[in-house]
Amino acid sequence: MTFISSISYRDKKWYDKRQKIIERDNHTCTRCGRRLSDNQLQVHHLHYFEERKPWEYEDFELITLCKHCHAEEHGQVKPSYGWKYEGMEDLEDLVGECDNCHQAIRYAHLISHPDWGFMTVGSQCAENLTSAFGLSEREEDAKRLAQRYRRYLNSPKWKNRKNGYFMDFDDYHIKIWSHGSYCNLEIVFPLWNRETLERRFEKQSGKRKYATLNDAKTQAFKVITDGSLIKYCEKNYPYDTPYKPIYDDYENYD
């Protein structure tokens, strides 16, 4: 596990980043859905990189959680979702005790959690914990995107030739040129003529210089996954579409 110094979290850069994420998430915990005051909310890093400071993460790598859900995420409190039902034993009398609510129980249900271990609970607690809705759709989407980003950065699909790095990502071809002290980025994307559906390729490149290879990779990932490149295409190529046509093949049956 990567640990970040508590001093870093007192830096104004982190304070500004934190406020930005909380405002983006509408002052709402992305897990439990409660809208709370800022002092009851915390910003969670979906993963960690040793070389990064807390504020050096992209917005899509951060989510807003309330204090309880954040503690739950880090295993500091008992998880309220993700439990697996293991089995049941009839004790024949109220001689057992639920590990969750501490009520006397006759039917001892065994449940388990990968981050917590085993618990013996009563029927109601077993139902509540094993059938809990779990992560909100927003949090699930955020985690999937962050995991995809991490795989993308270190993907074996990246090819290094001479002073360039190349990768096919979704329907796009990413080119990154290394010039020693900086990198340039170019993205080749497909377009289809709205009338003929004929495909052609265009490219987007700029004069921006990226300090590191990962900075350029990150920018490419962002504009592709957040819809920025699609919007660029729609604005600059009105007679074409960036969306792949759906071809319907009909067979004639006599």
Image: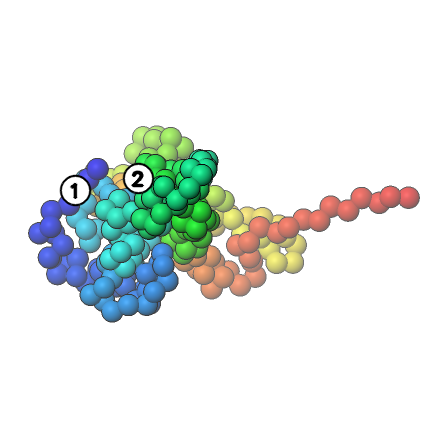
* Above/below status of 86 relative to 17: above
Q: Which is nearer the eye, 142 or 34?
A: 34
In the rendered image, which quarter is residue 12 located in?
A: bottom left
User: Residue 35: x percent and y percent?
Assistant: 32, 68
Give the amino acid at mark 2.
Trp
Q: Secondary structure at mark 1?
A: loop
User: What residue sits 23% from the left and 64% below the top?
Assistant: 40
Q: Secondary structure at mark 2?
A: loop
Give the spatial CA distance, label 1 vs label 2: 21 Å
**Left or right of residue 249: residue 199:** left
**Left or right of residue 79: residue 230:** right
Give the amino acid at mark 1.
Phe
User: Residue 71: x percent and y percent?
Assistant: 24, 51
Q: Which residue is mark 2?
A: 116
User: What residue sits 34% from the left and 36% below the top?
Assistant: 118
Q: How is the image coloured?
A: rainbow
Residue 254 visible (yes or no): yes
Quadrant containing the C terminus in the rendered view: top right
In the rendered image, which quarter is residue 42 located in?
A: bottom left
User: What residue sits 29% from the left and 57% below the top?
Assistant: 65
Q: Residues within 10 Å of mark 2 (few under 14, many from 20)?
A: few
